[in-house]
Amino acid sequence: MPGWRLPRGSEVFRTCPDVLFIFELVFGGLVWILIASSLVPLPLAQGWVMFVSVFCFVGTTVLLFLYIINIHDRKISWYILDAVYHCIAALFYLSAVVLEGLVTNIMDHDLNFTQEHYHENLVATTGDLAENPDCDN
């Protein structure tokens, strides 16, 4: 595929959009921590959000490591894997944002939760939104 190349070795840390892997890891880890520490009013919704956060964090870490050790050898299947992974991650994060927003909205109207719990979930929701990768990687 001319014009579109996968990173190899240290190029991951020097080229854009590959350097976005680092931001994806940092924000993904922060979202993971925020979701894990937040109050759980709807366990099913929070479970999905936690699954998405952990799945994408681990997936990005593995993909980054494989690019660093140059295992892909510029084969076409790795281009497809990269595109499919980032599209799935984008869909997962968008669904997690909707569910975390729903939980935050429920907490805003429920008197059993403090303002601190509400703000914690609000930060987790917007952090999840900031982490959302795009499919053109």
Image (cartoon, rainbow, N blue to C red):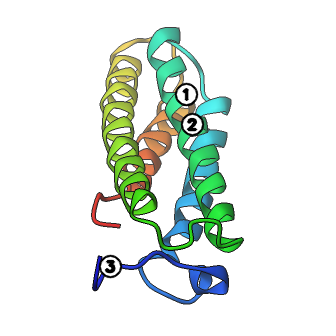
Residue 56 visible here: yes
Q: Residues within 10 Å of mark 2 (few under 14, many from 20)?
A: some
Q: Tag 2: residue type?
A: Phe
In the rendered structure, the answer to whether residue 98 lies left or right of residue 89 reads left
Q: Quadrant of the N terminus?
A: bottom left
Q: Tag 1: residue type?
A: Phe
Residue 132 visible here: no
Q: The residue tagged with tag 3: helix, strand or loop?
A: loop
* Residue under the image location 46 percent in, 75 percent down: 6
The residue wearing badge 2 is 55
Q: Nearer the viewer, mark 3 or mark 1?
A: 3
Residue 9, percent across and down?
Answer: 66, 81
* Residue under the image location 53 percent in, 44 percent down: 56
- Vertical arrangement, residue 4 with respect to residue 55, above or below: below
Q: Tag 3: residue type?
A: Trp
Q: Using the image, tell me which numbered label, if any, was put on residue 4.
A: 3
Q: Residues within 10 Å of mark 3 (few under 14, many from 20)?
A: few
Q: Quadrant of the C terminus?
A: bottom left
Q: Dividing the picture into quarters, in which one does residue 45 lie?
A: top left
Q: State which tag comes first along the sequence, 3 or 1.
A: 3
Q: Nearer the viewer, residue 29 or 19?
A: 19
The residue wearing badge 1 is 51
Q: Residues within 10 Å of mark 1 (few under 14, many from 20)?
A: some
Residue 70, percent across and down?
Answer: 65, 73
Q: Nearer the viewer, mark 3 or mark 2?
A: 3
